[in-house]
Amino acid sequence: MSDEFDFDIGSDDEAEMLAASVDVANGKRTHNNCDGTAASSNKRLRIENALNSTNSPNTVLANRVLKERFALSGFRLEQEAAITRVLDGGSAVVVFPTGGGKSLCYQVPAVCFRYQDQAAGLRVTQSSGVTLVISPLIALMKDQVDALLLRGIKAAVLNSSVSRDLYLATQEDLRNGKLDLLYCAPERLNSEGFIASLKDIPGGIRMLAVDEAHCISEWGHSFRPDYLKIARFAKEANVERVICLTATATEKVAEDIRNAFSIPEEGLFRTTMYRPNLRLLAEANPKGTDYKAKLVTHLQKYPGPTIVYVTLQKHTETLATDLVKRGFPARPYHAGMNTDLRSRTQDDFLDSKDMIVVATIAFGMGIDKPNIRNIVHFDIPDSIESYSQQIGRAGRDGKPSVCMFYLATKDFHLRNIFTYGARPSLRSLKLLMAELCSPAHRKLKVGETFTTSLYHLAKDVDINAIVLGIIFAQLELHFGLFRAAGTVYNTYKYATKDARHIQNDASPASRAIKRASVKAAKWTHVAVDQLSQSSGLDRADLVRTLNRWNENGAIELKCEGVQNIFRLQRPLPTTQKEISGIVKELDDSLSATEKLNIERTKSLIDLITAPACFSRALAAYFGETGSSAPVQCGHCTWCESHTQVVLPNEPPLPPDPVKVQKVLDAIPVRNDARFLAKVAFGIKSPRGTAMKVGASGVFESMNVCGFGDLLEVFGRACGEV
Ligand SMILES: Nc1ncnc2c1ncn2[C@@H]1O[C@H](COP(=O)(O)OP(=O)(O)OP(=O)(O)O)[C@@H](O)[C@H]1O
C-alpha cells in the first residue's frame, strides 16, 4: 500500500524520502497504487522538491519546531512544502483529506515567526505579530487551543463563549505581543471593535489561516457569506500572508479560493483523496424494503465503531432506540441535544470499540478517532462533498473499513425539501426590502448606523435565519448598501453580589442605572437603550458602568436580546424601481442557488448509480484524473459486482385537486404561492409557525407530489401565473 495514499500512516521523514528517491532513481517500484501501477512522475517531482527544500533554512527551522515543540518526528509530504512556502512569505491553499494534518500547516509557521525574527534580528522582542486563525467550529477551536497551551505554545480563542475575564486577558496579551495564535469565528470580523483591537498588535497579523476555506466559494457545498468578508479583511488589515485549508475542494472551488486571496497556482498543495482501505458499497432500497432489518444485518456483519448518518434529528432518536432494542450499543447525536449530552456521547464514542452513533451531519467534524470501522448513509447526503467528508472519517488507522450507502427515492425527496424550504418567496424579499428602506432608515446619512435584530427580522419577513444572513451579506458585498459593524445587547440584567459597592458608586451613569433598574425574583433588569434616551447619557457609559461592577465582583451580569448594527455605505434606494431591481437580483440569485443545490444531490446519485468505480469517480470529481487517481479500486460495489445500483423509479404523484382545495380551505393566504406549496409539502417556516399550520390537518398532506407541480397549482390559486 502506498504511503502517499494512506495519509495516516507514518510521517515521511527525511530518511524515508531519501530511500524512496533512491529507489525511484534506480527504477525500483517501492510505492504501488492499489491497482499495481508504478509511482507517478508527479510524486517523484514532489519528492525531489521536498528534498531540495530540506536545504532551505525555513524548512530546517520548520522541522526543528516540529520536533521540539510538537514532539513529532517528521512531516507528511505536502505539509513541509506548504509550510516552507508560507515561511518564505508566500500564501498557500492546502487541500488535504479529513485527518490529513492541515492544522500543523499553520501552527508550525505561527511558532516559527518568532525564531525567524530572532535569527534575522529585525524585530524587537514581543513584536513578532500573531497568526489569526478563522474557523467556524467553536468547540474545535477550544480543543486546539488547549492542546497548544499544553505544548507551551501561546494561543487563545475569542468567541461568544469566552468569559469577560478571559476576553480582557486575551486582549492584553495581544496588545503586549504575547500570543502566537489567536482563533476566532468568521462572524467576529463583523465587529468594528474586534478589528480595531487587531490594529494594536505589535508586529501585526503575520499570517491569516482560513479553516474550512471551501465555505468561501458559492460553488462549494456549504457557502458561508461571512467567508467572503475574510478576503476583504485580509486586504484591509494588511496581513502578510494567507493559508487557506480545506478537506473538500473541486478544481473550481480551489480556484475560487485562490482568486479571493490572489494566490498563484503554485501555492496550491493538494494530496489525493483516494483511500484504498475504504470499501465503498451502495444498495438501493425500493419502496416496501425493510430498511431496519437490512441495517441490522449489515451491522452484525461489520462490527466496530460506527456512525450511521440520517437526515432528520428525530430519526437519530428513533433509529438509535430501535438498534438498542436489537442489542446494539447505539446512541443518538444531533445539534438539538444539550451540550453536556453531546460532549458525553462524543467522549464515549472516542473511547469505545463497538459504539454506534446515529447522527445528523452535526456529528463528526473534528473527530480524530482512528478506528471507525463503518460509516452508514441511512439517508442521502446533500452532495458529493458531504459524502466524501463523512466517509473520510472511517479507517484513519489505515485498516479496512466499510462505507455503506442506502439509496431510496423517498430520501432524495426528503433532501430536496431542505433545498426548497430554504428559498424565500418574492413576497418575503419585498417585505425585507420595505423594512430595510423604511422612512426611518432612509433619513440616515452615509456613515451612520441602524440596528436590527436579525433573529426577529427572520420571523417578521418569513425567511430562514441562515438565508437571511446570506441576503444581508449580498446587500453588503454585492450592492454595497451597508456594512456589518457589530452587535449590541438590548437588555442587561444583573444579580447583586455586593450592594455596598453599587451604593458607593455615585457616578451619573450609576445613579441612572439604579433609578431605572426593575427588580424581579433573582435578576434586576435594565433597558439600556431606553435609559440612554430618557437620561441623555451615552449608552456606552451605561454599559461600561455595568461591566465595571461585573469586573469588580459587585454583580453577576447577563446580556440578552442581541441586535445587529449596520453602517450605511451609500444612500438607501428610494424609488420603487430601484427596490424592485434589488428584489429581482436577489430572487434570481436565490433561484440559481436552489437549482445548484438540487443538482448537487443529483450528482451524488449519478455517481453512485453510474457503471463505474466509485473511488475513481470520486477522485475525478475532485479533479484527480492523473496517474495518482485509482484506475479501479477493486472493492466498491461496481468493481465487485459490475452491476449498476439503480435509484428506484418512484416518480412524484400529480397534485390531487381535492387535497389542493383542502389546503386552500384551511389556509386563507392568497399572496404567496410558495408559502402554500411549503405547507402542502411539509416545510416549516416562521409564517407557518405563527399561523399554527401544523394543527391545520393539511400540513405535509401532499408530500408525495413534486414541489414544482405544487408551486404551479398554488400559483394559479394566488393569481401569480
Ligand atoms: N506530520 C505528522 N506526523 C504525525 N502526526 C501528524 C502529523 N500531522 C498531523 N498529525 C496528526 O494527525 C491528526 C490529524 O491532524 P489534523 O487534525 O491537523 O487534521 P485535519 O487535516 O485538520 O483534519 P480535519 O479535516 O478532520 O480537521 C492529528 O492527531 C495530528 O496530530
Image: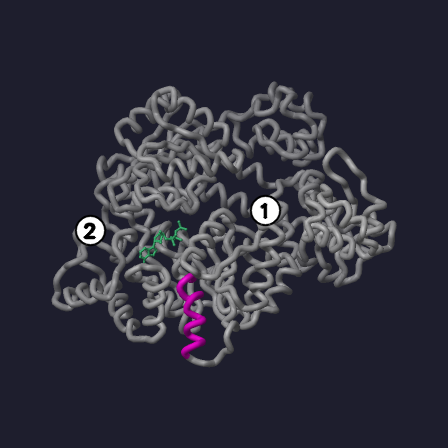
Magenta region, residue range:
106-119
- Residue at image position (28%, 68%) is 50
Residue 171, given in percent of the width and then of the height, sits at 60, 61
Q: Is mark 1 within 8 Å of ligand 1?
A: no
Height in image: 568 above or below 560? below
Tell me how far mark 1 sits from mark 2, CA to CA.
Answer: 46 Å
Residue 105 horizontal side relative to residue 313, left or right: left
- Asked if the residue at tag 2 contacts the one at tag 1, i.e. Cβ–Cβ closer than 8 Å, the answer is no
Q: Label 2 belongs to which residue?
A: 1
- Residue at image position (67%, 55%) is 486
Q: Amino acid at mark 2?
A: Met
Q: Is mark 2 within 8 Å of ligand 1?
A: no
Residue 352, given in percent of the width and then of the height, sits at 34, 35
Asked if residue 691 is among those painted magenta in the image, a careful observer would answer no
* Residue 577 in view in this figure: no
Residue 428, given in percent of the width and then of the height, sits at 68, 41
Q: Label 1 belongs to which residue?
A: 590
Colour convention: one colour
> Upstream in the sequence, badge 1 or badge 2?
2
